[in-house]
Amino acid sequence: MKRTARPIPSIADLVRMQPQLQSWAEMAARAYGLYEGINLAIKRSRDKWPAVAHHASVFRDEMALMALIRSFAVMDREAEISFQAVNRYLLSESAAEEVAAVYADAEPPCSLATARAETSAAASRFVAAYNETDFKAFGRIQSFRNNQIAHISWPEAEAAKVTYADLEKLVVGCCKMAGELTLMLTGCNDWPEELIETNREEAYRFWLSAIRADAENRLHVDA
């Protein structure tokens, strides 16, 4: 079945999309960071596998699925708000000047010449990150499109040959695109990818401590 061409958004559409794309990329980054931190904590505790480790394993898969769902939301070709729509806009003839004008008017204002240089570089990095997307892997994720994706389990995702490596690449790519889009429209440096490391470290410390405390019978529940 031949795909119909999707409409090219306007600059107003792009400005409207940016906050939501940033927010969803941040949520995907947090979830993936939590997955990685929990996974590392479990690996460091394989010699003792107490009940807390089993709970951690369940939570780990839930975080992977959350990252998958949130990344899918910002990359879905059929969605009105998506990085695919942003990419279509940035490849249009009017994009360079329109984006530069928005950047120039952002606080603090700058000259149009400065804006052109900054937004051109950001747009190039965005397109490069978009082109690095593994759309073959993304196609496997799309097998769960619409409401089904919110109700799958990780074993089902694995059955569709979606791997953790696929997920990592997708999340990181979405984070890069969100950061570049925010930069070119607002002039602000706000990089969701940094949330992966922050949440990874926090989850690792928490769950490793909990697993070790359980293994050593140091967990107590007040009556």
Image (spheres, rainbow, N blue to C red):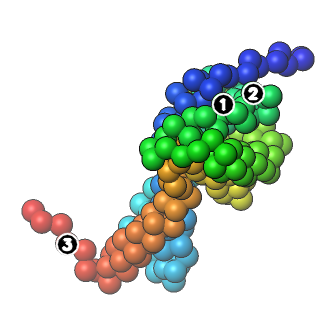
Q: Residue at x 75, y 41 (%)?
A: 138
Mark 2 / mark 3, whichever is N-terminal: 2
User: Is residue 193 shown above or below 119?
Assistant: below
| Label 1 to label 3: alpha-carbon separation | 60 Å
Q: Badges 1 and 3: C-beta atoms under 8 Å apart?
A: no
The kind of secondary structure element at disc 2 is: loop
**Circle 2: residue type:** Ser
Disc 2 packing (10 Å; few <14; some 14–19; many ≥20): few
Q: Badges 2 and 1: C-beta atoms under 8 Å apart?
A: yes
The kind of secondary structure element at disc 1 is: helix
Viewer-closest of 12 and 202: 12
User: Is residue 119 shown above or below 221?
Assistant: above
| Label 2 to label 1: alpha-carbon separation | 6 Å
Residue 55 located left or right of residue 63:
left
**Circle 3: residue type:** His
| Label 2 to label 3: alpha-carbon separation | 63 Å
**Residue 206 picture location, percent across and down:** 36, 71
Q: Residue furthest left?
A: 223
Residue underneath mark 1: 98
**Circle 1: residue type:** Glu
Residue underneath mark 2: 94
Residue underneath mark 3: 220
Q: Residue at x 52, y 55 (%)?
A: 189
Quadrant the N terminus occupies:
top right
Quadrant the C terminus occupies:
bottom left
- State the image quarter where residue 73 is shown: top right
Residue 210 located left or right of residue 8:
left
